[in-house]
Amino acid sequence: MNIHAEDPIIEVHDLTVSYSQKPVLWGIDLSLPKGSLVGIVGPNGAGKSTLIKAIMDLVPLSSGYVKLFDTQLDNVREKISYVPQRESVDWDFPASVYDVVMMGRYGKLGLFKRPRQADREVVQESMRLVGMEAFKNRQISQLSGGQQQRVFLARALAQQAEVYFMDEPFAGVDAATEKAIVELLRRMSKEGKTVVVVHHDLQSVAKYFDWLILLNMRLVASGPTVDVFKEELLQEAYGGKLTILSEVGDLLTKGRFPSREKTV
Amino acid sequence: MEAIYIILAGSLVAVSCGLVGSYLILRKMAMVADAISHAVLPGIVIAFFISGSRDSLPMLLGAGALGIITTFLIEFFHKKGNLQTDASIGVTFTWLFALGVILISTFAGKVDLDQDCVLYGEIAYVPIDLWITDTGTIMGPRVLYISGSVLLVVIAFIFIGYKELFLTTFDPSYAAIIGINTTLWHYLLMGAVSLTTVASFESVGAILVVALLIAPPATAYLLTEDFKKMLIFTCIIGIIVSVLGYYLASYIDGSIAGAMSTVAGLIFLVVFLFSPTQGVVFRNRRSKLSMTLNEEPI
Ligand SMILES: Nc1ncnc2c1ncn2[C@@H]1O[C@H](COP(=O)(O)OP(=O)(O)OP(=O)(O)O)[C@@H](O)[C@H]1O
Ligand SMILES: [Mg+2]
């Protein structure tokens, strides 16, 4: 199943990505609507991180192309933000929470320029949104895993972008914080920002996202959650791992999962 | 006067080396310095054959060119060959150094060239190696001008590119996404490392250069968790190394470069053991303290 967006903000055409000749993503073709909260779901090694890296031109494409805002990435970089997987950096780096969140402003500042009052205010507000303002001067090496994740989120927010890619932003984050962040992401998507999130917890997928991408090296499905969150499609994406699936199956049959429309 | 010249030269070199070394350490590329110190040898030999002289300028150019080539090769093997950075560094510099050795041994009979002449400059000669203009005016030790200029270049570079260097060192993929050219900044930094290393070799000798690139920033890293403070501490430690090293050398009447390297190592050791935040001794004592606290009945 592959439903295309009417007025897409992100388009991926026939995308193939290989690491040292070995393809890890095959012929991906999809489009995403503006202002949607998109979940990317699939088993470990499915190529979820690779897909968002390929969209942001962090890994070379073997074939295909990507369009953002109906143009090339280089023309719209200031509108794109990224929350990498937490393990992608060395947290023993000598920097404070404030330093890292301020990095979100670097793209707008350019060479020579020092942060101005307006930048400091944006940084302050971003830290507040993720509940990290009390840790402003804390060294990043002294944060818990969940706090580090929130620092990355705040840095992305400080960028004031239009499209956000987040690679497992909820990994290691406690339930209360996760709830607060999801609320925040919803508000952003209501304001017309597009948020694409790699997510692992099938239990909350239907609750959080209004658009879903199922991935397992190939595109299994892409479309509105109500159409895509179906047992046979999940079965196809997770092929074999039946234990999780039967749990989700229970969820599906009992119709227990609240749809997003009902919660907002 | 002699003491001041030597200490000043040592400090200038120590501060430039420490500043670029801070970035190398945080990028986990500390061994690049060692690699460059060896890999420049063929550059020096080739420069000698081309220019036919032992003037330092052509040799510096030859060494500088090889320094840049070294960093390119390291990056190339790492990116294209999927080799770990340390393996890539190891392969590159041993091969280039061997090439230099072969060049020298093949032509050794014909030319008066050995590694000592450029590679292993001697800081003790700083006061007698004067810059004399064509009109005969004595401008003072040549090395002070060279290392002073290098320091200015390094400071200007860090001042202009502070944000870009900071971000590309911490999180290169995020830097790339917000439109910072990470490859460009990598090579600019490696260019600064090559310039600093090669110019400093000629002034104070290779071993001292490698020591000054690594030990002061490593010490500063243990003392603070703020990057700006790390840079400042590095400079201060570099100057302390230079002063104490000089007086240690005159006290024991030994090699100045050797004494400075030793002091750099000793300061690192002392900080490693006694640093209030990271020191081994305090950490142990703290954990013992918290253990005894935990054992107390509530
Ligand atoms: N730098 C790399 N070099 C070689 N192979 C890689 C590299 N990065 C990822 N891969 C391979 O590509 C495939 C997809 O990896 P990717 O990280 O995109 O998966 P993922 O869906 O994000 O998995 P996870 O849920 O574990 O985060 C995996 O098989 C992985 O082994
Ligand atoms: Mg991943």
Image (tube, rainbow, N blue to C red):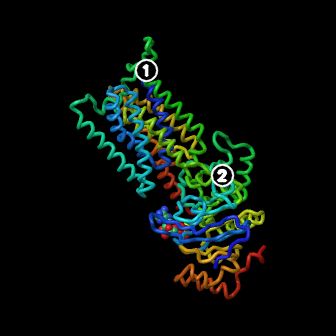
Cβ–Cβ under 8 Å for marks 2 and 1: no
Task: Look at 48% across and 38% down and name the residue there.
Answer: B18
Q: CA distance from mark 2 to mark 1?
A: 46 Å
Q: Is residue A43 visible?
A: no
Q: Is residue B169 visible?
A: yes
| Label 2 beta carbon less than 8 Å to ligand 2 | no
- The chain carrying label 1 is B
Where on the picture, by quarter, is residue A165?
Answer: bottom right
Where is residue A53 drawn, in percent x and y? 57, 62
Q: Nearer the viewer, residue B9 or A40?
A: A40
- The chain carrying label 2 is A
Q: Is residue A157 above or below residue A42?
A: above
Q: Is residue B80 above or below residue B201?
A: below
Task: Look at 70% across and 79% down and name the residue there.
Answer: A226
Q: Quadrant of ligand 2?
A: bottom right
Q: Which residue is mark 2?
A: A104
- Name the side, left or right, on which A141 lies relative to B45: right
Mark 1: give few (<14), some (14-19) or many (20+) Cα within 10 Å: many
Where is residue B197 drawn, in percent x and y? 43, 36
Instruction: Identify the disc placed on residue B285.
Output: none
- Name the side, left or right, on which A146 lies relative to B239: right
Specify whether disc 2 shares its chain with disc 1: no
Mark 2: give few (<14), some (14-19) or many (20+) Cα within 10 Å: many
Three-letter residue code for mark 1: Pro
- Name the side, left or right, on which A61 lies relative to A173: left
Instruction: Identify the disc placed on residue B141.
Output: 1
Where on the picture, by quarter, is residue A126?
Answer: bottom right
Q: Nearer the viewer, residue A174 or B123?
A: B123
Instruction: Name the quarter where the C terminus of chain A is drawn.
Output: bottom right
Instruction: Name the quarter where the N terminus of chain A is drawn.
Output: bottom right
